[in-house]
Amino acid sequence: MDLEQVLGELIGGNGVLIALAVFIIICVMLGVRIVPQSEKHVVERFGRLRAVLGPGINFIVPFLDRVAHKISILERQLPNALQDAITSDNVLVKVETSVFYRIIEPEKTVYRIRDVDGAIATTVAGIVRSEIGKMELDQVQSNRADLIAKVREQVAAMVDDWGIEVTRAEVLDVNLDEATRAAMLQQLNAERARRAHVTEAEGKKRAVELAADADLYAAEQEAKARRISAEAEAYATEVVAKAIRENGIEAAQYQVALKQVEALTAVGQGAGKQTVIVPANALEAFGDAFKMLKGRS
């Protein structure tokens, strides 16, 4: 056997081994699948669902099985959507919504729905219009939390068949059209003006009430002063009467003479008085007063 034949046999034998090695490597590469933590792989065999591969090392049958879909299970956010809605009191509003979701069952998602984002956006828009149609504008503005809870609950129930979990569904804003905004502003200004008039009227009413209370208080105080004065005069009269009963007419004359003396003394002490005019009977009054005082001492 010559050298060329030996080399040919060696090359032929090595070629088979090389081909076998290459085939084994290809089988290993096709049969071993490493799935990232953030993904799930859908495996098909002859066009039918075979398995769903989770994160880590997985094995499939080479040439029979194939990874048809690689699905990310990370949470996703739909673009903010703006849709029109009409409240129960016929007010047109523009509602801005935002939805977050993630795929939890890829086998349902890839075989039951084609455009996941579009389907969820349409579902959310329909639910928002339906819920706002049951509410008045004031309720939409004041009960935003209830509206969000209802939208989230209904969206979660409707997308369950798609293997999707809605993690968040938010109503970001509720805007009014220009005509409605202008009408509401006019109504608000009218309400403010009404409140100002009511406040002014209440202030005037309160002022009148306070003035009446002040007049009543003054009248009560004046009546009280008159009553006290009358009681004092009555007391003085009673004292004089008692003195007359006990001491006779002399007590009365003594009181009269004493009052005359006090009156003349007050006239004499007036400012700028150089001359004091004394009545003719003044001396008699002084004399009577001195006699009585002397008699009492």
Image (cartoon, helix red, strand yellow):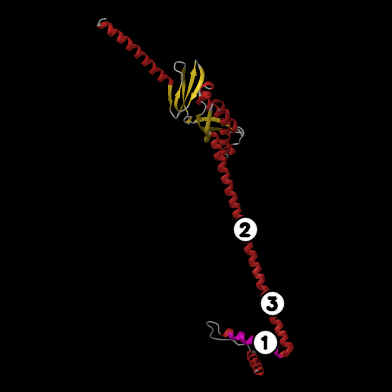
Badges 3 and 1: C-beta atoms under 8 Å apart?
Answer: no
Rendered position, 23 above or below 134: above
Q: Residue at x 43, y 23 (%)?
A: 33
Magenta span main SS:
helix
- Report helix, strand or loop for mark 1: helix
Q: Give whichever of discs 3 and 2 has the lower sequence position.
A: 2
Q: Is residue 175 left or right of residue 241?
A: left
Residue that label 1 marks: 255
* Location of residue 67 with respect to 183 vertically, above or below: above
Q: Which residues are magenta?
A: 250-265
Of labels 1 and 2, the one closer to you: 2
Q: CA distance from mark 3 to mark 2?
A: 34 Å
Task: Residue 122 in the image: state x and y as whole percent.
Answer: 54, 26
Question: Which residue occupies 54% across, 37% down?
Answer: 182
Local crowd size for mark 3, using a 10 Å CA cut-off: few (<14), some (14–19), many (≥20): few
Vertical comparison of 217 with 172: above or below: below
Residue at the disc numbered 3:
231
* Whether label 3 touches label 2, CB < 8 Å: no
Location of mark 2 (residue): 208
Of the two numbered discs 3 and 1 on the same chain, state the one appearing first in sequence. Answer: 3
Question: What's the residue type where badge 1 is placed?
Answer: Gln
- Quadrant of the snapshot with the C terminus: bottom right
